[in-house]
Amino acid sequence: MSGCPSSPGAVTDSCAPVSGDVLAQEEEPQGFGDLSELPVEVSERRPTCSRCCRPAKVCLCPFLPPEPLDVSTCLYIVQHPAEESRVLRTVPLLAACLPKGKCNVLIGRRFSEERHAELAAVCRDAHTLVLYPGSDAVNLEDMDVDFATTPHNVVIIDGTWSQAKDMFLRNTLLHLPKQVQLNSAPSSQYVIRTQPTNMCLSTLECAAVTLSIMEKNQAIQEVLLRPLRALCSFQLQHGAQVHHSKEHLLKSGLYDKPLPKNKRKIKRMQKLITNQDV
Ligand SMILES: [Zn+2]
C-alpha cells in the first residue's frame, strides 16, 4: 500500500493477523480472463494505479473528480484488517476523491489510547461524530448544527456487518463521540458484494451520504458514487454476478443456502424478512 493515497495516515496493527480464513471469504471475481490463470506472485505484481489503487488495466481515475472535493469535514475510517486485502475495496476510491488529510485510514481490530493517540484525541474532540446505527444514535439529518462554521470529524467503521459490530462494541474509544446514523440513506448501489440488508451501505456510500448532509451539498454524493457505479458496471460486464442482499433473497424465496442451525441466527434472518431492527 506504500505510495497509495488511500492511506495517508494508515497505521497497520501488527497484532491483528489476517488469517487465510478471512482472506478466503471474498471470492476472486470472475472475468479477469487470462490473468486468473497466472501464478499468484505474478498477478500480485501487476501494475497498480497510484491514484485509485486499482490494477492499471481497470483504473477508475476517469470516473474520479479532476480535483479533490473541497470539504470541511474530516473522515477517520477505522478499517478491519480483512478489508485491506479484499479485491473490491471502496475506501481507496473515497480517499482519491478527497483532499489529503480529509480521509484518514487506520487499520486494526482494537484501538487503544496508548497505541492510537491520534484517534484517541479525535474521539475526545467535541466536534467528532461516530457513524454507527443503534438506539443511542441520533439521525445526522436532524442535527441542529452548522457543520460549515464548525467543521467536524466523522469516524466510520469499515468492515463487514459483523466485523463493524464487533469493532464498535469492543473499542471503548469509539463510544466517546456522539453516535449518529443515516436516516434517509438510499438503497445500496454496491451490488457486487452481498449486503445483509438492502439498507446496508458500503463505506463509500455511507461517506457520500454523510458528506452531502454535513457539507449541505447533494452534488458530493453524485461525485463520490460515480466511481462506485463504474466499478460495479465494470465487474458486471466482466462476469461478476449481481449480489442481492440477503433480505431481498429471503423475501423473494431465492435464498438457496441451507438455513443455519443456530436459533439466534434463524431469528435474525426472520427479523430481516419482517424488517424489524436487528
Ligand atoms: Zn487510477
Image (tube, rainbow, N blue to C red):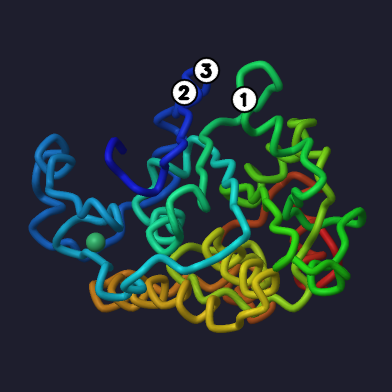
Say which label, 3 or 1, has the lower sequence index. Answer: 3
- Going by the numbered disc 3, the residue's amino acid type is Cys
Q: Nearer the viewer, residue 216 or 275?
A: 216
**Residue 187's spot in the image, x, y percent?**
62, 78
Q: Residue at x 69, y 38 (%)?
A: 122
* Image quarter where ligand 1 lies: bottom left
Q: Quadrant of residue 117?
A: top right
- Going by the numbered disc 2, the residue's amino acid type is Pro
**Residues at marks 2 and 1 touching, judged by CB atoms closer than 8 Å:** no
Say which label, 2 or 1, has the lower sequence index. Answer: 2
Q: In the image, is residue 258 above or below residue 106?
A: below
Q: Residue at x 62, y 74 (%)?
A: 212
**Residue 47's spot in the image, x, y percent?**
13, 49
Cβ of mark 2 under 8 A from ligand 1:
no
Q: Residue at x 77, y 50 (%)?
A: 127
Helix, strand or loop under label 1 = loop
Q: Nearer the viewer, residue 231 or 95?
A: 95
**Residues at marks 2 and 3 touching, judged by CB atoms closer than 8 Å:** yes
Q: Nearer the viewer, residue 109 or 119?
A: 119
Image disc number at residue 116: 1
Q: Quadrant of residue 255?
A: bottom right
Mark 2, residue position: 17
Q: Quadrant of residue 241?
A: bottom left
